[in-house]
Amino acid sequence: MSEPMAVIEAKGPQGMVSLRADLSDERVAKVVRTATGCALPEKRQIVTGEGAAVAWMSPDELLLLVPHEAAPGVAADLAGALAGTHHLATDVSDARAMFAIRGPGADDVVRKLCPVDIDRLPDGEIRRTRTAQVAAALWRSGEGEISLIAFRSVGGYVERLLQVAVDGGRV
């Protein structure tokens, strides 16, 4: 039996905090660094640090990836530190599912399912897109690895799509 072109792994619980705010505000940069150890990412970038990451999602939105158990506290700390400033800090951990696509064919899996020019996706860039017909975000998270986030409500569907793409069946 030959090796699969990629392996799909549904990641365990991942802490995710959505922060909507004026990303040019120096207070935002300071509280994000305090919460994650990461600088603010540039447009369409993801910055990774020790046990945390910060992804640019839109001109006024970041997604902070932190340990699952830390997410409620991180959201509360952000809200407290930004009190009096127009913002929204929300723990969205339980609303999202995360997958790893690993192996020499990881790019091929993405090619089958996402309208993204994966060959031009450099390290450190996050792309909001769709997987088949559902919203997703993806980035290169390691050598031969792509991480993908989707809504948990369609997580089973996305996991099956990814597996069908690996197995070579019709999607």
Image (cartoon, rainbow, N blue to C red):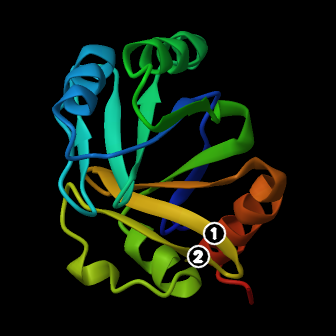
Image quarter (top left, top right, bottom left or bottom right) of the C terminus: bottom right
Task: Say which residue label 1 marks.
Answer: 135
Image x and y of residue 48, in percent: 24, 36
Residue type of the residue flagged with mark 2: Arg
Q: For residue 66, say whether it is visible.
A: yes
Q: Say if residue 1 shows up in the picture.
A: no
- Up-down: is 117 above or below 50? below
Q: Which residue is mark 2?
A: 130
Q: Work out whether residue 132 or residue 40 is closer to the camera in this orientation and state it.
A: 40
- Circle 2 packing at 10 Å, graded few (<14), some (14-19), many (20+), is some
Question: Please, is residue 125 above or below residue 16 in the view?
Answer: below
Of residues 26 and 39, which is closer to you in this image? 26
Q: Is residue 36 left or right of residue 160?
A: left
Secondary structure under badge 1?
A: strand
The residue at 67%/44% (across/down) is 96
Residue 97 higher or lower than 28, as above or below: below
Q: Residue at x 66, y 45 (%)?
A: 97
On the image, the x and y values in percent for residue 146 come to 40, 57
